[in-house]
Image (tube, helix red, strand yellow):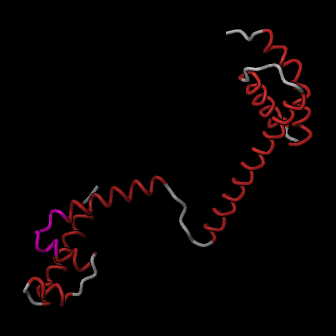
Amino acid sequence: MQPSRDQLDLGRRWRPALLSYFLRRVRDHAEAEDLTQELLAKLLKHDGDDFASPEAYIFQMASNLLADRARRQKVRAQYREFVGRSEDAGIDPIDPFRIAAGRAELADLARALGALPERTQTIFILYRLENLSQDRIAETFGISVSAVKKHVARAMAGLMKAMRSAP
């Protein structure tokens, strides 16, 4: 696909002025090149060449690109500052590998919990996850508090054994 004559004329006519405009403002040649290319690409997509004042239109677009760039840089700086503060505060950053490992461990725990006898599983869930008192669980099941403690201990031992042998 070859560029049309209009496209080549557009690039020849506006590229030096736009590059100069961006260089004066961003003071980074690579960034100025990128902004120039982005603006020229937008101009090529524009279907109408008949502007009342093409210079004003083009440089307004250039100004808008610079404003967008400034907003992006501000957001990135705020994010870097937040991440820096959260690391100082002892907050762990989000790590996809840790999330995946945690999900795998949780799946292993759910399987191990499902392998427990139903009554032991229910008592363990009520005590450890639902925070019901052992007295209340004993009353609900019609067993002694000592039996509840034994169910919880049996569940803990089974879960620990299963988690140790999990891959």
Q: How many marks?
A: 0
Quadrant including the N terminus:
top right
- 14 above or below 78? above
- 4 above or below 96? above
**Residue 51 within the magenta-colored segment of the rendering:** no
- 50 above or below 20? above
Magenta extent: 114-122
**Residue 124 quadrant:** bottom left
Q: Which residue is drawn at the image coordinates 13% and 87% (left, top)?
A: 138
Q: Which residue is drawn at the image coordinates 11% and 73% (left, top)?
A: 119
Q: Which residue is drawn at the image coordinates 14% and 90% (left, top)?
A: 145
**Residue 153 quadrant:** bottom left
Q: Which residue is drawn at the image coordinates 81% and 14% (left, top)?
A: 8
Q: Which residue is at the front of the view, 2 or 154?
A: 2
Q: Is residue 37 shown left or right of residue 137?
A: right
* Residue 19 in the image, given as x and y percentages of width and height: 87, 31
Quadrant including the C terminus:
bottom left
Q: Is residue 108 shown left or right of residue 92?
A: left
* Residue 53 in the image, given as x and y percentages of width and height: 89, 27
